[in-house]
Image (cartoon, rainbow, N blue to C red):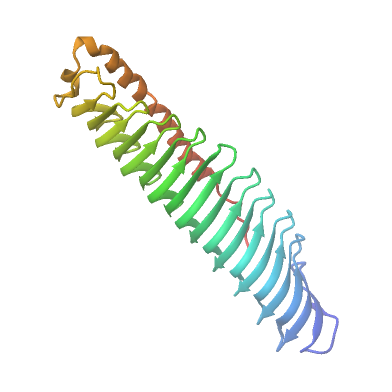
Amino acid sequence: MSTSTNDKNAQRAIDYMSGARYKGEYKNGKRHGFGKLTLSNGSFYEGRFVENEKHGFGIYKWSNGAIYEGEFAHDQPHGKGKLTSRSGDIYDGVWANGKRHGQGTTTWKDGNAYEGLYDQNEKHGFGKHTWKDKGSTYAGTWEHNTPHGRGRYQYGNDDVYEGAFKQGKRHGQGKLTYANGDIYEGEYAEDLKHGTGRFSWANGDSYYGQFSNGLPEGTGEYIWASKDAPETSTSPVEERISKSEKKHTRKISSRHSGESRHSSQSDSLLKNIQSSSIYSETF
């Protein structure tokens, strides 16, 4: 190590055996105050030091082009800061011990964005995620990077689900409003209508009863909106529709076949969430 000044408590320019170079303030033989530390690979930190540690406001720029601007504590981002990854993804928000923790906003290069709470680098708490490429949004509670608890998910085709989520899937009580005006309100399990629920068609017809794996099954009541429609029935769904009413059975089957489409959309929701991780640089 070599030094270019005789003043131990003033400005110094120091070259280390590793190839790193420090130029800035020293105190009691340690980097202390404002300075710039350049590593042998071209990465550098410029900002405040306290007893050899990055502490206070500073800028850290990697040789690959990524950059962090914000507060440091004990060599780690801590407090408010903005990280721009080498790919162009941006996180702007609160940090704790080098991790995203607290309120923050992540904007991905492709236009997707998340604004809300983080816990140890994970989306955790209330937040809103927008998938620009899919035209979909989720606003609600998160747990370990997945929707969990109460939330609202709007699909790219303008269908809207509001209700309970469990580990990224619709699970519990919820309401799905289709873009064409149809509505299902009731219980879900593992992303499918399952349990007791009511399906109301835009023309006024409705079914209230049991569902299993996305389809009516068990005891239920079907009400036709038109005056000349058959009487309502509380018999098992399989038995309640006579041969003359098979067209209604076909109607139910075709309308509920769209459930598989919504299931696949929810699967893509999980995949989108899992792939939406900002590039993590090492400080």
In this image, 265 relative to 62: left or right? Answer: left
The residue furthest top is: 244
The image quarter containing residue 189 is top left
Q: Which of 132/277 is in front?
A: 132
The x, y position of residue 61, in whole percent, is 72, 62
The x, y position of residue 102, in whole percent, is 51, 64
Residue ID at (69%, 51%): 86
Q: Quadrant of the N terminus?
A: bottom right
Residue ID at (74%, 67%): 18
The x, y position of residue 49, in whole percent, is 68, 78
Total marks placed: 0
Q: Which of 274/209 is in front?
A: 209
**Relative to 164, residue 24 above or below:** below
Residue ID at (81%, 83%): 11
The residue furthest left is: 235
The x, y position of residue 211, in whole percent, is 25, 31
Q: Which of 110/181 is in front?
A: 181
Answer whether residue 98 is visible to the viewer in this image: no
Residue ID at (49%, 60%): 117
The image quarter containing residue 94 is bottom right
**Relative to 19, residue 256 above or below:** above
Answer whether residue 191 is visible to the viewer in this image: yes
**Relative to 142, residue 160 above or below:** above
In this image, 160 relative to 53: left or right? Answer: left
The residue furthest front is: 227
Q: Quadrant of the C terminus?
A: bottom right
In this image, 83 relative to 150: left or right? Answer: right
Q: Which of 16/222 is in front?
A: 222
